[in-house]
């Protein structure tokens, strides 16, 4: 069990430390942790946000536990050298095409959502986002039109095999949950989305036990606020998935509790909290590490098939919350290490 640990910037090292304490407490046989530099920290040390030695560590590992990247003092750099490029580079180089973002309200935290408690309390969904295609990775540029106006352009496209493989991930995820899959697109306007819908329908023939529905992205955004409990698994493209998964996180109430997985073919994956580097509280011991701890649980489940210890971690986090151990993002005053101590105690 060789795990690459990329703590990154800001609060990344603090929250990652607590997740590692939890993994080590489990005393899993064969566990090996190998650290590497990413993001702004890597740029300052090596001159690049994803240096070659870090990529080598990633390739030699079975999975990656990732903290956070982002350093506003480096925003002046050309785009290719900014800290966030470390994440995009890892996705591309390692073929991390499927992003899983679960969103669930923990018992007793319903009031933290901006939605009414009777609405937010029903949220228990998973967003499956395609991660290496779409407009984010298409050709792009700026040009000057004949009349002298500047124009920016970005190419949105999906090949059918790219849609097919993420559709399989979505259907398989639904099979392990409530067997309902909602495919989100904009097929009434975009040809890319029409192909997406056609291919998802083709794949659905292989999963007769899963109920497939389709929804335009604007309606999906509305339904996430109006009736989020109606969703089980959502599968969608890179752009729409980026937006909807962030929206779902705020429907839950706090991004400090939400983990994510970015998976390649097979069992390889990168696991990270969805929050950023939060430079305003970095180094102060205030960050909530629960999302990173829950990311470690996802790592054990998806990359190593270790359901029992993954479930133990999740139960320990839930027990700590039920006992009133809450960080500042949840309206409490527990610090990073205090939260880690509580999760370890319940573990």
Image (spheres, rainbow, N blue to C red):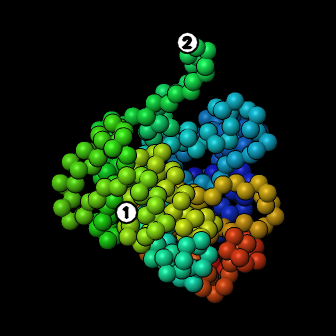
| Residue 116 screen position, x and y as percent | 54, 77
Q: Residue at x 66, y 61 (%)?
A: 16
Label 1's element? strand
CB-based contact (under 8 Å), mark 1 and mark 2: no
Say which residue label 2 marks: 146
Say which residue label 1 marks: 233
Q: Residue at x 48, y 27 (%)?
A: 139
| Residue 150 screen position, x and y as percent | 61, 21
Q: Quadrant of the C terminus?
A: bottom right
Which comes before the other along the chain, label 1 or label 2? 2
Front residue of this view, candidates 216 and 82:
216
Query: Outermost residue toward the bottom?
Result: 323
The residues tagged by marks 1 and 2 sit, at their Cα atoms, a distance apart of: 47 Å
| Residue 121 screen position, x and y as percent | 49, 78
Q: Is residue 95 left or right of residue 72?
A: left
Q: Is residue 24 above or below residue 274?
A: below
Q: Is residue 86 above or below residue 299?
A: above
| Residue 258 screen position, x and y as percent | 56, 65
Q: Residue at x 26, y 44 (%)?
A: 199
Q: Is residue 268 visible?
A: no
Q: Residue at x 57, y 52 (%)?
A: 4
């Amino acid at each position: 069990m060789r795990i690459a640990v990329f703590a990154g910037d800001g609060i990344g090292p603090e929250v990652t430390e607590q997740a590692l304490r939890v993994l080590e407490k489990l005393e899993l046989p064969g566990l090996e942790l190998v650290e590497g530099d990413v993001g702004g920290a890597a740029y300052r040390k090596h001159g690049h946000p994803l240096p070659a030695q870090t990529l080598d560590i990633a390739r030699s590992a079975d999975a990656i536990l990732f903290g956070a990247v982002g350093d506003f003092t480096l925003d002046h750099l050309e785009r290719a050298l900014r800290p966030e490029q470390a994440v995009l580079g890892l996705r591309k180089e390692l073929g991390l095409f499927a992003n899983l973002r679960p969103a669930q309200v923990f018992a007793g935290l319903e009031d933290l959502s901006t939605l009414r408690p009777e609405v937010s309390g029903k949220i228990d969904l998973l967003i499956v986002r395609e991660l290496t295609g779409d407009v984010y990775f298409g050709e792009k540029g700026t040009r000057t039109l004949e009349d002298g106006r500047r124009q920016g352009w970005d190419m949105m496209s999906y090949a059918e095999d790219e849609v097919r493989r993420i559709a399989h991930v979505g259907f398989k995820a639904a099979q392990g949950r409530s067997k309902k899959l909602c495919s989100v697109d904009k097929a009434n306007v975009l040809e890319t989305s029409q192909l997406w819908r056609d291919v998802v329908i083709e794949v659905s023939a292989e999963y007769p036990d899963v109920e497939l529905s389709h929804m335009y992205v604007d309606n999906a955004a509305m339904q996430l606020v109006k009736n989020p409990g109606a969703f089980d698994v959502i599968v969608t493209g890179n752009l729409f998935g980026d937006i909807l998964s962030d929206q779902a996180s705020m429907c839950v109430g706090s991004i400090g509790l939400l983990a994510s997985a970015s998976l390649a073919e097979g069992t390889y994956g990168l696991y990270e909290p969805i929050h950023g580097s939060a430079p305003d509280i970095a180094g102060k011991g205030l960050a909530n590490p629960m999302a990173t701890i829950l990311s470690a649980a996802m790592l054990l489940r998806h990359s190593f098939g270790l359901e029992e210890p993954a479930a133990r971690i999740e139960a320990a986090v839930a027990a700590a919350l039920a006992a009133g151990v809450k960080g500042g993002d949840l309206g409490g005053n527990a610090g990073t290490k205090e939260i880690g101590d509580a999760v370890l105690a319940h573990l």
